[in-house]
Image: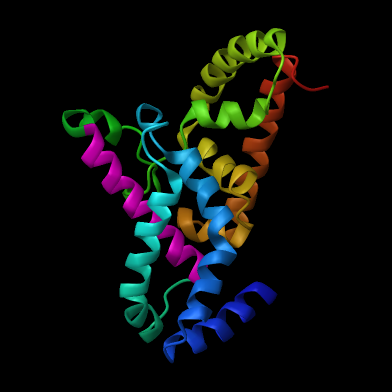
Amino acid sequence: MREESDDSLLLTSAAQGDQQALNQLFERYRSRLKKMIRLRLNRRLQGRVDDSDVLQDAFLEATRRLPTYLAGPQSPFFLWLRRITGDKLLEIHRTHLGTQARDAQREVSLHRGALPAANSMSLAAQLLGQLTSPSQAAVKAEMRIQLQEALNSLDPLDREILALRHFEQLSNAEAAQELELEPSAASKRYLRALARLQKILRELHLTE
């Protein structure tokens, strides 16, 4: 894969102390990681936590841990960086939610038991897109509630693979590794979840 090949060249430079190469790597994945944060930030913290601050903490941690990663990479660089970002997001959840942390734990995704799951509110907002007029905003609010309820009725693993493939735009191989599935099983699961999502959208008259 071209992207992984480019990563390898930059990582080689970063291993030799080239900070600019490391910055290029971080910048390459900034937008994808921001999308992940926005999907998975607990709804009670939206507006209180800035995604750029989460990324800054993640990049600092990644810089500190880079020598260990380079000594024996177990996954592509992006997935490693995404995992560190997810860990930072989980730390923020625990810090800000305090005594509500036990409730937040219910929103933790199935794979590896750590990364915060994409919440149905964020998924619904992404699906509905941005509406600007007052009449559209009213429709959007009503439809988002119905869409959230429908998304909540999906199997948690189906919601997760939709979040990974459809919203975060991970490849099938990346999603399979994150979910600890065989690529063929991840592909079948995604197609099944996508069919269910399309059925939901048709029932809510959001698509033909």
Identify the image quadrant of the C terminus.
top right
Quadrant assignment, res 30:
bottom right
> Is residue 168 within the magenta segment?
no
Q: 95 or 155: which is nearer to us?
A: 95
Q: Is residue 170 left or right of residue 63?
A: right
Say if 44 sits above or below 20 in the image. Answer: above
Q: Residue furthest right?
A: 208
Q: Is residue 191 left or right of residue 8?
A: right
Q: Is residue 18 left or right of residue 190?
A: left
Q: 54 or 122: which is nearer to us?
A: 54
Say if 85 sits above or below 47 in the image. Answer: below
Counting labels gives 0
Residue 101, position as x, y percentages in the image = 22, 34
Q: Residue at x 48, y 76 (%)?
A: 22
Residue 94, position as x, y percentages in the image = 23, 40
Whether residue 37 is visible = yes
Whether residue 84 is visible = no
Residue 170, position as x, y percentages in the image = 60, 55
Give the color scheme: rainbow, by chain, secondary structure or one colour: rainbow
Identify the image quadrant of the N terminus.
bottom right
Q: Is residue 88 left or right of residue 137?
A: left
Q: Residue at x 50, y 72 (%)?
A: 23
Q: Residue furthest bottom?
A: 16
Q: 181 or 27: which is nearer to us?
A: 27
> Is residue 82 within the magenta segment?
yes
The magenta segment is 76-97
Say if 145 sits above or below 86 in the image. Answer: above
Provide the major secondary structure of the magenta segment. helix
